Image (tube, helix red, strand yellow):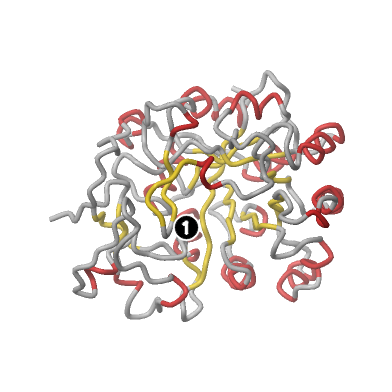
Amino acid sequence: MPVAVSTPFVTTSVAHWNTASLKASKPHDVRRIVDLFRKPRTPDQVQLISAHRGLRWGGIAENGKESIRRAALASIPSVEIDIRCTSDGVVVCLHDDGIGRVTNIAEHLGRDDVYDPLTAEGYNPLASSVPWNGVMERLRLKNERGELTDERVLRLADLLDLIKVEKLTMVVFMDIKQKQAMAAAYDAIKSRSDAMGVPALEWCIWKADTVFHRLPTDLEREEWFQDGVSQGLPPLYIPVIDAPTSLEDQQLPLVSAKQWASRSYVVSLEMGLRSPHGPLADVVHWAREAGHSMGFFAALGDVPNDPTPVEDRMVFHEGHPPMKYDELLRPGTSNDGHDHRGDLALFKRLGFSWVIADPALGTEDMFRGQREAVTGK
């Protein structure tokens, strides 16, 4: 019997994205896809999509094999997968710090206090405190309704195997959740390739907040990065540039962006812009005028097919019941108190050429347009 969390505001399906309705797509040239993410797109072009935690929902668990397959079938050029380490150093694909929302950890251990994301109560141990061997390897993933699926927690190694064995052509954005996961991910990737023999270092992209490495010189001192350079394959990178939290750091984002953009291994810049005239507006203006590619996260909520206005949509937040994005704003990150990242048309006008997004209301045309965006047909 499925174990379900009470989620009255979650719809029961995302019929538009049923796997059965998707037709197998012809493989793309993965190197060409990376090049497309490097280049700014004109206002008349569809923004490229990186499917947020895979093409999830409709009963499909996030960060799982099926979410990757569905993205490939839908001709989505990229998936954004979350990367962190277990207590015994295994690289796994999990978004939250805790594993209570997306796995059956409580049930597996015979506990009654199953984590409920609507109340933020229940057993929710940190992924970094749980070993893969003997524990996490035995867990099952839950879907958006809190129901158990047949999928296991995905290791990065499993994802690489899936892409090769099933001959998927997919750029993987690795959203790094822990600094120590960066080197561990490199060890998992450095000797891998896809079915066409293209090294994984050419289609797996590290995407990390600049709190880990403020400037490219900080990253370039890392032994794992230097190993890639010595092999002739410097790891591809997307720095995530966010608004500063202190007055003395106000100029750092622009300085940082300019330095990152000068590196050939940097595919693009992800901007944490919340408001069009707020912090980071100067960085966005500079990048657009300088002809650099930019991307952002579309704040569309964690509820499939949510009919409420974008600004009222809810997102799961660890330690709290679901919240609006405006409620999650850090002080000083928006000049008007609102998070505008759900306004896709606004961000397109601002010059953003790609977006990390879910198949939510308002993104249908963008998702349908990915095949043409990638192939030109």
Q: Residue at x 29, y 44 (%)?
A: 59
Q: Amino acid at mark 1?
A: His
Point out the residue furthest to the top here. 44
Q: Residue at x 65, y 29 (%)?
A: 347
Q: In the visual, does 215 lie left or right of 112?
A: right
Relative vertical location of residue 160 with respect to residue 370 in this rendering, above or below? below
Query: Which element type, helix, strand or loop, lies under badge 1?
Result: loop
Q: Residue at x 35, y 28 (%)?
A: 16
Residue 120 at x, y = what percent?
Answer: 35, 58
What quarter of the picture does the C terminus occupy?
top right
Q: In the visual, does 237 lie left or right of 193?
A: right
Residue 66 at x, y = what percent?
Answer: 37, 49
State the image quarter where residue 212 is shown. Answer: bottom right
Relative depth, front residue between 366 and 156: 366
Q: Residues within 10 Å of mark 1 (few under 14, many from 20)?
A: many
Relative depth, front residue between 39 and 259: 259
The residue indicated by pointer 1 is 95
Relative depth, front residue between 226 and 163: 226
